[in-house]
Image (cartoon, coloured by chain):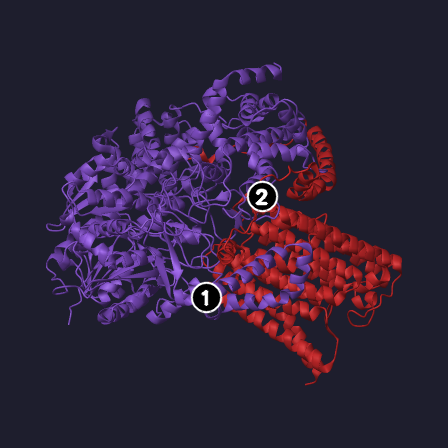
Chain colours: A purple, B red
Amino acid sequence: MSKLELEEESSTDGNHEHSVRRLVENAARFLPTQGPIEVFVLLNNLQAFEDQPFHQALKAARECYQAEPYLSEQEYRRLYAKGRITDEDLEAVVMADLGQRGLKVINGLGMIAELRFAMLRHPIHVGPDAELRWVVAETDALERFRDQTTRINRTRIITSTRKWLNGSGNRDDIPELASLFEKFGHDSSRWSDVGWEAFSLQLLWRICLKGVACSHKPAEANSFVRPRDLMLHATGDDINRNVHDVLIRFCAAYVDQGYSDWTLPNRDAGFYESFLALYETKTAGLNSWLSGLACDVRRLKQEHISAEQCIEHTLTEFGIAPANREAFITQSLLSLAGWAGMVWQLELGVDWVVHNVPKESLIGMLAVQLLLERHAIRHIGREAFGESDSIPQILALARQKVSQPEPMKRERRAFLLFQVAQMLGWTPLELLQLTDDEWQEISDELESFPSLERRRIFHEAFERKYVHATLDAFATHTARRRNVASPWLNRPDFQIVTCIDDREESFRRHLEEVLPTCETFGAAGFFAVAMNYRGAADAFYKPLCPAVIKPVHYVQEDVGYTFEGEHQSRAQIRRQIGLFSHAFHKRSRTFLGGILTGVLGTLASVPLVARVLFPHLTARIRQRFGSLLQPPPVTNLQLERYEGDPGPTNGHIGYSVDEMAGVVVRLLRDMGVTKSEHFSRLFVICGHGSSSLNNPHESSYCCGACAGKRGGPNARAFAQMANDWRVRTKVAAQGVDIPDDTFFVGSYHNTCDDSVVFYDLDRLPASHREDLEVARKAIEEARRRNAHERCRRFGTVPLSISAKDALRHVEARAEDISQPRPEYDHATNSLCIVGRRQWSRGLFLDRRAFLTSYDPEADNDEHSVLLGILSAAVPVCSGINLSFYFSTVDNVHYGSGSKLPHNVASLVGVMEGTSSDLRTGVYQQVCEIHEPMRLTFVIETTPEVMLSIMERNAVINRLIRGAWVHLAVIDPATSEIQMFKNGEFQVYQPSGAKLNEVESSLECYEGSRDHLPFFSIHETEVA
Amino acid sequence: MTVDSTMWYLGRIVVASPAFVLLALGLPMLCNVRLSEKLQSQITKFGVTLGLLAATTILVLMLVTGKRHVPVELGHWVTIEEEHFHFHLKFVFDRLSVPFTILTFILCGTVGAFANVYLHRDAGYQRFFLLYALFLLGMVISSLAGTIETLFFGWELVGLSSALLVAYFHERPGPVRNGHRVWTIYRIADAAFLIAALTMHHLTGAGDFDRMIGKDSWPMGVSAIEPWQALAVGSLLLLAAAGKSGMVPFSGWLPRAMEGPTPSSAVFYGALSVHLGTFLLLRVSPLLAASLTLRILVIVLGLISAVFGSMTSRVQSDVKNALAFASLTQVGIITVEIGLGWYYIALIHMIGHACLRTLQLLRAPSILKDRQMLEDAVGARLDKKKPENAPPPTPFQLWLYQFAMHRGNLDSMLDGWVVRPFLWMFRLFDSFERRWTNFLSGGESRESDRLSPYSDSLEDVI
């Protein structure tokens, strides 16, 4: 068939083009959704599979990404040995999984549930063929009982063998019995105990081997989705290596946000087009596999073949059947998923980046990839088969060469049976009586519970144990809390609202311990102020609100009028220094500039040595000098709008009074603080963020509700709004009554160095000075204790460290350029509590819980407040939780690998070394202490309300019904808990496990680096 | 105690302290004893500090007493009289070796402190510090070497540890392949070096630099050999230097070496390893003086490398690649300076460049934040927007871009002109052998031919 025909066919048939585009867009769903790293949002890695139930989705994703869905079996066994998974959990999960079928007895050998239970309790290992061969031939697996075999079962098997041998057993059943006797000697009376053991096991093995022989299923033929897989199996050469080498460099240049000095020529024309333009000419000595590329490219250009047509040609040339197209395109794109995902994200348009890429870039990328693959295949064809013209022919030759593996199915099945027989004490006698059908049944039964299934059960059991412990703790703790009187008489000393973030759990807990008369709340950290913000020293507006919201309001930080002149001159100096240092770094990489910087470079040894060896001191010196250049200390937020529409220009900046009132009402109502008696004199709004050095992932540490930025300005803006008398009047009209003597103060908590700063204290009335002092003192102590609690997780910090040194340590950590884990981010998160603090206060949650304040009594009949809270909290918290889950179970595929070789590429992401796929997800150093488990929501509401909310919100419904999160509702008045399971709420019966009571958080965690159980902390008596 | 004997002791300490670190870290590993991270870091800290103190004291003593050449003899280790061969361990402290040794200690010490935190809890912590100690020892030996065989010894240690550090993440194929590549290129450089050493022995009867480059202290030495001899030995050494410093045509290994953890990339390929080649040239500078042709060769090679490096660096869109080629540019320029006879400038340039590059590489992950801060300070985006009606790129620009993007196709040229002929030859012999064994066994003689490279797929395993 000539080429021309093919081309005509594809150019006339418009549907084909359409379908390629559709397939690419479809495949793009499976790519990582991570945009440029500057805004790092933690999302569920398996969003594309969210419409399926959890375990099913995991299986599907395993097919798609070849990624692990659970921890390794070994790891679960380690948890089992440690008591983090108990027999009871395993039994319960196995029974629930099997239902009635579990009770079925198989051929008199035992119930299915027992069988599975035995396989879970004892490691069953059947390795690859080579290993199996080795185990059978070289180890004493056939001579000695496995260590785990109980004494009873050993005796049972040996006795039965003796009986069988001495009795009238039909020895002809065992064909190789003769050889056994030859080996052990014919006179069995002279065998030692060891001899009997070996003989019994050999006999058992032979019986198993003979038994399963009848059940032979044909091996499945290896199907290769991509020609690359075929070539890899046939020749051992991976075309990805060559193709990726070129493609990665090109992708990096294509999406570059301004790092390289020379921009990729023609890149605005599109991926495919700029590639063709660049490779039309050929430089001398180009890699031999690319030698035909220029010629090919010229042909494509001359014949005006579009990217889609080019893909179409390759599909035909590779002989991809229409049914396989989807899989082929998906797998092709996934082979360089990070870069493809980035191209796709930029193609969709990211608001704040410097350079977005034109539409259809992903199609162009696929076309280029396939074009390169064609050349790489030809190259291997030439090397391996001496054939380089026709790809179909090369593939045919490769198909001939590839050997279909003949797995040792029979031995494998037999070995599996052999191991289980020892575990359950099946005797040779019993097994000999099985018919062929019975053999088949039992062998199938064992094979239907492979490692993947075992891991699923293990995982369920692991989560079950934790969830039950949680619910038990809440049942007991809420009951205890009912008898604890409120620590304050009329009003709390002060109130503070932090983000719902799990890292603030300990901060709030310590605060409540330090000053029992304070009340804490949790709300999404943007505090209902969705804005574009520009600080006094910032060049651009940046959104400070959850990534799903597109803010319309603009807020700017202005320098006080008095300091305006100084501000200008400082800005000018900053500008000059900035320009100079930019030029310095850029020039240091060039020819002439490099000479100068090189000769002067010796001076660099000073900051080099200082920053590495004395990070804390250096940071303080830098701060001292830096403060001379920063904007003056007194600034204002330009918060009120004078013109009609919001916008970034003068007059349009800010909120109208009505809008401010809306913001204030929204937050206070969410937290259930609406009546005047609810308010204390001082109300602190505390945003959070994190600062660390040398960390491209810094954004992931910051506030998720502020689009990976620091949430201080939101807190500041909210406080300013809520202090405005006009706003208060309007708020009162909407039913939220803020007393006149309540003053709001904005503040910012840095979760990395545990510092807390307050905003606009100049405006604090003298009457509230004392209240602030009380709050400040308590916060000061709380942050010290918080740092201390955090330090137990850092391996280099001795457990005996004092609170003061702990604070110093975390401060130094944030300033250390060599620190790959400045903090542990959301690691260990596992819970989300929604409800009044009253019943969860004092429960030690080990920094594992998102805490959201919600008062069901203040909610309306439609429960729209709860709906509002959950429609943000469920997807956001589960996104964080699941991204940690996946990055932990398979850091290579879902996470971004070790941070150690990370290399910032194109200013959009990180590579490992200088030529790898773009790595997305959470990196290994942060996941290392995480326990992968789905998030458990404990919500203070009723099942009916929850069901109605699920009905009203599709996302919540999908996540809960698909078991992507666990859900329990609690009534703190009765401590009754109902769990959502299999589509309905079931009352949970607490096990009555003891919940230890302690005096302080310190008692809970002191001396331990591990995950901790729950504790009930006594409410400190107020003097 | 006289000044001389003090220096003699101090000199031994300088060499012994890294050797101690290597032994203290390596022996327990051999005996399968796991030292705690803390202990390992203390051993390293102790060794480096001691070495640094001793080296600095020597510098001070040299400045005070005005001595410019302090040899420290450790005797003949291997002597084969019939062949007139002896392995002579000798170290020299002079104006070249002392600054370079101090630089080595400072950079290695800083990077060691960096890596101690950076690699905390990493599975390869112990391995990293072992290789680090090996590297440090190699660097100290090569910088202080007084004979060519001593220099070669240190040079080999550096090469070995560098290649293993490139392949630090050995669970991924990329780093291993790249480490292998680096190793191969080092071997070429080593071969050239070895031949040069033999030639020198042949010409002067010993490997002492004294014989070759005169008794006077660096850089005043005058070579006692003929210009053509200088050219022969010098060219070989230049080849060795080019391989070690990643100069054209060996530049392909530089970016590949960035596969290891950031601190090792920083100190080894950004700072110390790459300068070892230029250091060699400085060490044998009197040879250069003896032959004009050799000097011209050095200048040309340096110039080409510098231009190539600066061009290639411009198209790199990731930090480490850009810095790798930026290093190359400076190494090229340093080579030019050496060719021109500006030895002190070259030495200062080398030290300054090493410090700066280490800092830049260690801070490489900060690029995003730095950029944000700069943009905030400047108040605008840093990269200039392309004008709307910019002319389309000319064919030359496209050619140049492709050339730079493919790094001058140096790797593929090496593959084509060096690797392929070798492979072809090996395969030819292999086919001879196969025919012969087939003939002897009367059939297919190799079982391995029938095995598919990926026969056992782990996916079937339950």
**Residue A537 position by quadrant:** bottom left
Q: Chain of mark 2?
A: B
Image height of A317 relative to B270, above or below: above
Residue under label 1, please give it: A565
Residue type marked 1? Gly
Q: Which quadrant would the N terminus of chain A be assigned to in this image? A: top right
Q: Quadrant of residue A179?
A: top left
What amino acid does circle 2 point to?
A: Lys
Within-10-Å neighbours for mark 2: few <14, some 14–19, many 20+: few
In this image, A189 relative to B203: left or right? left
In this view, the residue farthest toward the bottom is B1
Measuring from the top left, give residue A99's x and y in whole percent. 22, 33
Residue A588's disc number: none
- Give the residue at x 84% y 55%: B232
Instruction: Give the image location of residue A480, x and y in percent.
Output: 13, 57
User: Are the residues flagged by discs 1 and 2 from a single subunit?
Assistant: no
Q: Which mark is residue B386?
A: 2
Residue under the image location 27 percent in, 56 percent down: A721
The CA span between labels 1 and 2 is 34 Å
Q: Front-most of B126 and A886?
A: A886
Q: Is residue A871 left or right of residue A739?
A: right
Q: Secondary structure at mark 2?
A: loop
Q: Chain of mark 1?
A: A
